[in-house]
Structure formats: C-alpha cells, structure tokens
Image (tube, coloured by chain):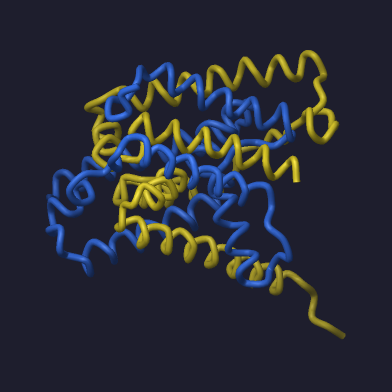
Chain colours: A yellow, B blue
Amino acid sequence: MAVRAAAAGFGAVFGFAISWGQFTDPDRIREMLLLEDPYLYLMMATAVLVGLVGTRLLRRFRARALLTGNLIAWDVTRPGARHVAGAAIFGLGWSVADSCPAPIAAQLTQGVGWSVFTVAGVGLGVLAYLVWQERRADRALPAAA
Amino acid sequence: MALEQRPAWYAIGLVLGLVTVGLLAFINERVGVLGGYSSLVERATGRSQQLSWKAWFLFGVLAGAFVFRLLAGSATVHGGYGWLTREFGTDAYVAVGALLLAAGALIGFGAKTAGGCTSGNGIGGTSTASPASFVATGTFMATAIVASFVIQGLT
C-alpha cells in the first residue's frame, strides 16, 4: 500500500510538472523537434543531471529504499538491436503525435479529447508487442513429445 | 503562481530529476510511464492478476495533470491538436483520429521494444547511466527530429 501511494504521489508531481512545463502541448514538442526552441532539451538535460548526481549519491552511501528496505540498485543494460529498432519506431510515432506516453496521459485528464485516440493507440501497440513476444516464446519451445 | 506561463526550464528539470531520485530512494524503482500502460493492458487481458507500482505511477500522472488543469483553468493544448488539426482541420475526426491512433501504436510498440519511452529511457535509464538508454534516447531523438522535418516539408 505504501509503495502504491508513493508511486502515485511521485506520479502526481511528475504529471503536474510536465503539464506546467508545457511538455503536454504538441506545438511545444514540435518546436523542440524542429530545433526551434531549446527549452525541453534543457529541461530534460537538467532532469538527467539531477538524476545522475542523485543516483551516484545513493550508490556511494549504499542507501536502502525507505519503504522497502532493499539495497538501492538498478540494472545497467547493454545496447542491442532492439533498442535501436524500438526507439526508431517510437521516434516516428512521437514525431506524428508530437506526444509520448506521459504527456498523452496528462492530456487525457486535462480534457484534451484527441488524446483518447493516442491512448488507445498506445494500448494497442503494447498489446501487439505482448502478443508478438508470446508467439516468439511459443515458437522457441521444443515441440511436445 | 502563473500556471499559464511555463517556469524556467531548470525548475521543471529539477523536479523531474528529483522524482527520478525519489522513486529510487523510496521504492527502489526506475521512473517510467509506459510501464503503467503495459501493466493496465496486462491486467485487462488477464496476463497479470494485479497492477504493478507502474500503474499507480501512471494514475498519479493522470491525477497531477488533472489538478494542474483545475488550478490553471485551461488545458495546455488550445484550439485543436498541433500540426494535425492545422493540416486536416479541427473537425477531421477520422483523419486526425486515425493518425493519432497509428502514432500511438508506434509509440507503444516501439517503446516496449526499446525498453522505455521518453521518461523510462530518456530520463530514468540515462540517470542510471545505462548504455542502452543512451542509445535508445539518441535514436528516438534523431528519428523524431528527421521525421519532423520531413513532415514539415510535406505539409
């Protein structure tokens, strides 16, 4: 329960912040992607810088998570073809919708009706991925004797 | 507090960075929004019996944006939806809706394949210095920038 509450609380701050920073406005995203306005690049770079410093500190002090007591750790993944191919597909969708999963969700509760289509699309894309992975796993299994 | 004006980029960046560190410090998890959609889809289709913390983070995003809307008095999207409604018209529900549905599907499928979206790879993964996240972020940024210039050229 505490974990869920913490996740929702941090999510609420995230949703409010991206709304205030107008990351939820497709025209702001378009200005970003057409290299007309550095605001969102600088915003993301600041977030990553703060994140990098914070995660280094957590690791240096071998901190434990306040609610779960686990030693704070994370996976570091080597890049593979799926990261390039998946990100390219994602980038295409991003450039058409001028929005990505967090802003799409934020648009929905801001009352932007168009986001209903995008939310449905993201759900379908996720479902297509899950079905694809399940079929791949089925093919990889040896035939039953 | 003028919510219709966006604050300095470093202020919002600082908050997003603190959310990233806070999620690790409190529950030992990496920030990401697409995982919330995935958790909901998995629960709705019987692939999972319960919602993960990621779904609750997504619920929080929905709530935070709703509170912003209430306090600001208006949404951050005004009069249509960006280039799509300027090109096709604000009453072109079929054309714009179909493009947003298709774009959303690419976003969902692509981000699941790449292991994260703008927040999961672009902020969460890069904050933990994961090489895959730097590659994914560079790739989706470059692809989206090139595609945006192509769209601008065609419209």
On the image, the x and y values in percent for residue B84 come to 20, 53
Tag count in the figure? 0
How far from the left and from the top, in percent, is residue B68?
40, 37
Identify the residue shown where x is 71% and y is 65%.
B48
Q: In the depicted view, which residue is nearer to us: B101 or A6?
A: A6
| Residue A118 image position (x, y, % from top left) | 37, 58
Residue A64 lies, with reference to residue B150, above or below; the image says above
Q: Is residue A83 visible?
A: no
Q: Splitting the image into 4 quarters, where does residue B128 fall?
A: top right
In-front residue for pair A1/A107:
A1
**With A94 as the anchor, is B137 left or right in this view?**
right
Q: Is residue B134 above or below residue B55?
A: above
Above or below residue A101? Residue A132 is below
Horizontal and vertical percent for residue B25?
72, 26
**In the visual, does B38 lie left or right of B4?**
right
Observer-nearest residue: B136 or B117? B117
Residue at 64% over, 25% down: B21
> Where B96 sits versus B132, above or below?
below
Please identify the quarter of the rendering in which residue A31 is found: top left
Q: Residue at x 37, y 31 (%)?
A: A20
Q: Name, please, the residue furthest toward the bottom.
A: A145
Left or right, B11 with reference to B112:
left
* Residue A13 appears in view: yes
Quarter of the picture containing the C terminus of chain A is bottom right
